[in-house]
């Protein structure tokens, strides 16, 4: 199976940088996604990593190390609207486009 | 349409009743997915369609759950003899064939079984 582990909650200050970590079992792994989900809303796609390294998209960056089964999402210049749940999800080989999600990290941005 | 549309947005039903949840994917998207999300959890895979056929239904919890996509567009998730444990948000997502950069979710149907 594909166990996805991420912290349950994190708190950070507006304007700061926060890193949300995610670990997963490497067997059958074929890529890693990050989604943002505001309360009561659908998850929205943030990033996808299939190769090792850092992918940068504006204030958000995502890193992957396939050999370590490790990823992180980096959020810079935090804004209050970034308060949301951040979901790490693994894509399995031979599984179509089926994703296995972690439980999500609830990020609270404070003044 | 512009996005993935799910109806109803909320459904309250009595234990033992039958319910149907509808998903209208983005036009032209060949792949369609159903997920279920309980409070405080990540989405859990239920079933995946490629065109009209169910390519993977390994996530359906039991035979009370069934889904169809007869014309390769709109899909209906059907739940028979609902139980209180079925209460969750049911999310639908779609993607073009071969896309590897994430799919688009609908806003979900919040099902409450009382």
Image: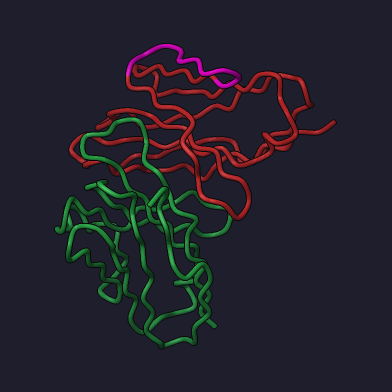
Extreme-right residue of the structure? A111
Percent x, y for residue A56? 50, 15
Residue range (magenta): A51-60
- Above/below status of A103 relative to B68: above
Q: Is residue A28 above or below residue A74?
A: below
Q: Position of residue A89 (x, y in %)?
A: 41, 37
- Name the one closer to the observer, B82 or B107: B107
Q: Residue furthest top?
A: A53
Residue A53 included in the magenta stretch of the image: yes
Q: Nearer the viewer, residue A46 or A66?
A: A46
Chain for colour red: A
Report the colour scheme: by chain
Quadrant of the image occupied by residue A80:
top right
Percent position (x, y) of residue A40?
A: 60, 55
The colour of chain B is green
- How many badges with numbers are in the image? 0
- Magenta span: chief secondary structure: strand
Question: In the image, is residue B84 above or below residue B69?
Answer: below
Residue sitting at x 52%, y 52%: B41
Which quadrant is home to the C terminus of chain B?
A: bottom right
Looking at the image, residue A87 sits to the left or right of residue B105; the answer is right
Residue B107 part of the magenta segment = no
Residue A76: image quadrant is top right
Up-down relation of residue B56 to residue A5 (above or below): below
Query: Residue pushed farthest front?
Result: B1
* Res. A14 image quadrant: top right
Residue at point 38% right, 56% down? B92
Q: Is residue B109 left or right of residue B24?
A: right
Image point (50%, 55%), residue name: B107
Which residue is depicted at the point 45% across and 15% down? A55
Residue B79, how many percent across, how many down? 34, 76
């Amino acid at each position: 199976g594909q166990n996805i582990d991420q912290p349950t909650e994190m708190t950070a200050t507006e304007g700061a940088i926060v890193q949300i970590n995610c670990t997963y079992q490497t067997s059958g792994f074929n890529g890693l996604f990050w989604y943002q989900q505001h309360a009561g809303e659908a998850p929205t796609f943030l990033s996808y990593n299939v190769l090792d390294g850092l992918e940068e998209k504006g204030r958000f960056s995502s890193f992957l190390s396939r050999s370590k089964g490790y990823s992180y999402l980096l959020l810079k210049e935090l804004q209050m609207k970034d308060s949301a749940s951040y979901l790490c999800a693994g894509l399995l080989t031979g599984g179509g486009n089926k994703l296995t999600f972690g439980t999500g990290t609830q990020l609270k941005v404070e003044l | 349409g512009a996005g993935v549309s799910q109806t109803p947005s909320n459904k309250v039903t009595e234990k033992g009743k039958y319910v149907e949840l509808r998903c209208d994917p983005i036009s032209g998207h060949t792949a369609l997915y159903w997920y279920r999300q309980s409070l405080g959890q990540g989405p859990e895979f239920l079933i995946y369609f490629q065109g009209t056929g169910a390519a993977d239904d390994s996530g359906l919890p039991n035979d009370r759950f069934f889904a169809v996509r007869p014309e390769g567009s709109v899909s209906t998730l059907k739940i028979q003899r609902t139980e209180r444990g079925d209460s969750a948000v049911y999310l639908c997502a779609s993607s073009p064939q071969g896309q590897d950069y994430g799919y688009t979710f609908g806003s979900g149907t919040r099902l409450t079984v009382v």
